[in-house]
Amino acid sequence: MKAPARPSFKARLRAFFRPPRTLSVTKTGRTYLVVTFGVGLGALNTGNNLLYLLLGLLLSMVVVSGVLSERCLRDLTVRRVGADAAFAREPFAYRWAVSRKAGHGFALTLSEDLSPLTGTGKLGHLPAGKEHIVRADLAAPHRGPVRLSGVRVTTTWPLGLFAKTRVFSLEGTLLVYPRRGYACKEPGPAERGPQGEAGSPRHLDGTGDMAGLRELAVNEDARRIHWLKSAAMGRLLKVEREREERRIWKLALETGLTGDALERRCEEVAAQAHQLLDAGNEVGLQLPERTLRPAAGASQERRILQALAWVGYEDADADSREAA
Amino acid sequence: MKRPLRLRLTLRDLAAGSAFGAMAVSGQLPLWALGVFFGALVLALCDVRLVARHARLSASALLIAAVLLGLQLTSGAMNAVVAACSFAGLIAAQRMLSAPDAAAEGQTHLTGLLMVAGGAALSGDMTYAMCLIAFGVLASLSLALGVVEAAVPDGEPVPVRAVMRPLSAGLAFAVAGAMAFFILFPRLNWAMVGPRSAPGLGAVSAAGYSNTVRLGGAGTIKGNPRVVLRATLTPDPDRDALDAYWVGRTYDTFDGMEWTNVVGARQTERQITLRPASDTLLHQRIELLPAYGARTLIALETPSRLGNAMAHTPTGTRSSPVQLQGGGEVRFTVTAPSYTYEAYSLPPDTKAGLAAGLVQAERDQLLAVPEHLDPRVSQLAARVLQGEKEPLAAARKLAAFLQKDYAYTLEQEGTPEDPLSDFLFVHKGGHCEHFATALTLMLRTQGIAARLATGFYGGTRVDGGYLVRAGDAHAWTHVLVPGRGFVTVDATPPSNRTSQGSVLLEKLLAFYEAVEARWRNSVVDYSFRDQFELASALVRPPRRPRGATENETPSRLPPARAWVTAAVVAFGVWRAGRFVSRWTRRAPALEATRFLDRVDALLQRAHVPRFEHESLEDLTTRLAREGHPLALALTPLTRRYLEARFGGRVLREGEAEHLLATLRRALDAEAARRAVKTAGQAGPTARAS
């Protein structure tokens, strides 16, 4: 049993000692600084006042760049909107809501701080007094709960010479579902459902939910005609009903699996559950420590994915579970 | 790949154009480089990316250009700075015409920056500053749009207007910051000398001196308003129009067509003395500009000493010895686009005496006339003079005659065989060379020694100095007066002696020159001395006004500028203090918060029942209301926390520990009390009865 993916000690130590803003030099910025240094040397060496003037302009641009980028990151509010569903090792849509009280924000790049999630969301312009949703395609390297400590907002505004970053401390947990890959194994026989050659008599009695009406084709069963509607329309209309061929499967995750074997099995079960539920069946799940009763629909698939995501992370605290 | 914003590319290309302009204004770049770059710029602005599909071909062309430039460099036909700048221009052109990707973008800006730096080495003109600012603004706008464009999702418009406003304000601050840096950054040298060697864009040597003066040429130079000479005079004549003769050289031999000298080059020294010095010499600090285009030193009539010359070559400034030539001409021995030197002249109306360097051969030539001189010249002179033999009076009489009866014109039809006769008897009109030649020859025919002098006439006051234009080029006559030496007599009508160019153009150029002079003084030649003077000027008492009487006692108060400086410095200190105090004031608040955290931790560990989001003061109030024993310990602690956090009373050293120890004891006592109580309720106690 392992705890949710926490940032490494080194990363946490770095975060502890991190100043309120971090600054990194871009590739363009490096070239700019080298040229500025060269111009400075040239000015000192030759005493050419025009080079001093140029040096002054170059250095002023650096200062102005710092001031403008700081104004860009100040008065900023960020909250997580989150993801509908995050699957391991495949891109998923993730959202943050950004707003500011005054001024304008430009060229903002948002990402999750100290987390294994990769990918960034970008926002070109953020005017004051309006909340913008920034969307990003993130990717998580593995399933399970991912502890989120903060949101990094980076800007290269105004000249792209430096990337200034501000980290908004926002605790949270993102539950990453196992990837629904290709299921190598069949899910096995259904626990309950139509068996043998004959279909269920329930399917022939026309008791399923009505899906729609269409004109009766040649050689079709006249017993499916909706007489009232046919009379109203003046032609024979056939009632189409949803299939009620719902079978019940109970998938199981074997005990004793660890490491890659556990991951593969989780992905397989997730894929099987997805296929079965997509076909309209009821699926239940037997885990080493809990059991999910069979049910159908998207909510059941979510429950199964959540249960699979937590496998191996059962000792996570209650807060993390709640947040996830 | 999304299509780049057209505006951004246009701004980038214009920025590169400005950077190239910073070099091109020096006039030192080869014409083919100018042509290639500006052609590429026009194509790029029309969004024609010619080399986008021929990257290798264009790279090969660049390589060939580099080799050719290298060959020119090694052969000495081009200096290294010019070659490097030309190559940077070619790279920028190639990048502008290539596919507009991020790499091309960055490289275009980088070459732009290098070109601007190269321009600083090539040119000292004010136009450089304009190009520099234009480059800074355009490149910044382009970069900023690029940064925002990269963050805008595909299909969404780039917020150009929103970008412009904050960026414009930032750029204004950057320019102001650059000026502040420039003024305040301490210079390591006392005398800073900026580049002066640039001949300027489209510059043509205007006043070119040669070894001869040939009559018959059209006087096109009189319409040229370009400035060839700047001079600072000591003592300052303080006149708006100097109207003085600036002599370059004289000619003693006339063959009917052209003037020459009989004597060639003589001594070479650092300084040449032409006449004995006196105590009242007029000192001139003269700067010959690239438009001058000759090596002859110019000085106010009558020069006494010339030298201390510095030649401003493209490779740097160096001392140039001067060489005495025939006709009193002094020449620089080093060829350069521009020079600075010192000259001393005798004050006007001083007995000059004969120049020490005047050799016998030259003296003999002062009465020489051409073999085939038209006899009518002599007859005309005799008729005008009517027996006048005193040289100066005769010369003035002849000059008055010529000014009265002859017209000044710059129009010349063809080249006559005998220009002097043509002037005197046919056209009866000509320019200064005709008037001066006629006067000189007419004097000689009457046995009066005279020679032709050439140089400039005029001097426009600009910013404490005087400017002389190419159009001020002039010729006049030196008459040898016994006991006085050579005296200047000018036969040209006075209104036609100075520049004959457009008045409006001259005014515009005078304004430009005034600004340019300020630029030179304030920027190009700005030095540690200027910084020192600027600092001392801020606190120095004001000078006594000119009209003030001696009895007026100056105010003991510092000048207004000192008050303003003090106010600005005080404001800066106050702002800095406020900034610092924000951090120092936060320290006690942080300490108090840490103290609160420790109290909360203790209470939590002791399992003191607490409502959700209940603050410490609420908890203390509640416990006091309930008569809880912990309230006794918590009340002073809470009050002290609130004082430290919001009341500005910082926790003394060890005080927090003391308060926490009290709380800990109270919590222990409470825990013990609860344990006893729990033990008392744990099980029924049997009592024997």
Image (cartoon, coloured by chain):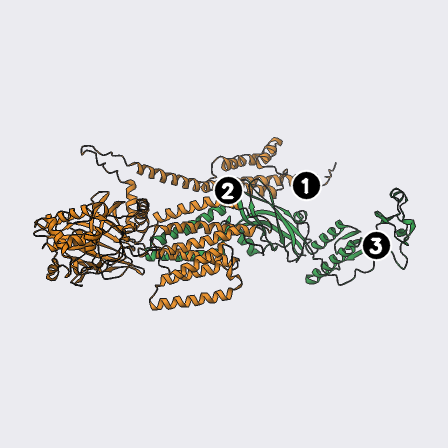
Pointers 2 and 1 within a single chain: yes
Name the amino acid type tagged 3. Answer: Arg
Mark 3 and mark 2: Cα distance apart in space: 63 Å
Q: Which residue is mark 3?
A: A247
Of all residues, the one furthest to the right in this rendering is A223
Percent position (x, y) of residue B633? 56, 36
Judge the density around disc 1: few (<14), some (14-19), many (≥20) Cα neighbours within 10 Å.
few
Q: Which residue is mark 1?
A: B679
Which chain is assigned orange?
A: B
Name the amino acid type tagged 2. Answer: Leu
**Residue A182 visible in image:** yes
Foreground residue among B458 and A163: B458
Which colour is chain A painted? green
Q: Quadrant of residue A267?
A: bottom right
Q: Which residue is mark 2?
A: B590
Q: Secondary structure at mark 3?
A: loop
Q: Is residue B596 above or below residue B92?
A: above
Name the front one of labels 3 and 1: 3
* Point 72% across, 53% down: residue: A305
Proximity of marks 3 and 2: CB atoms separated by less than 8 Å = no
Sequence-earlier tag: 2 or 1: 2
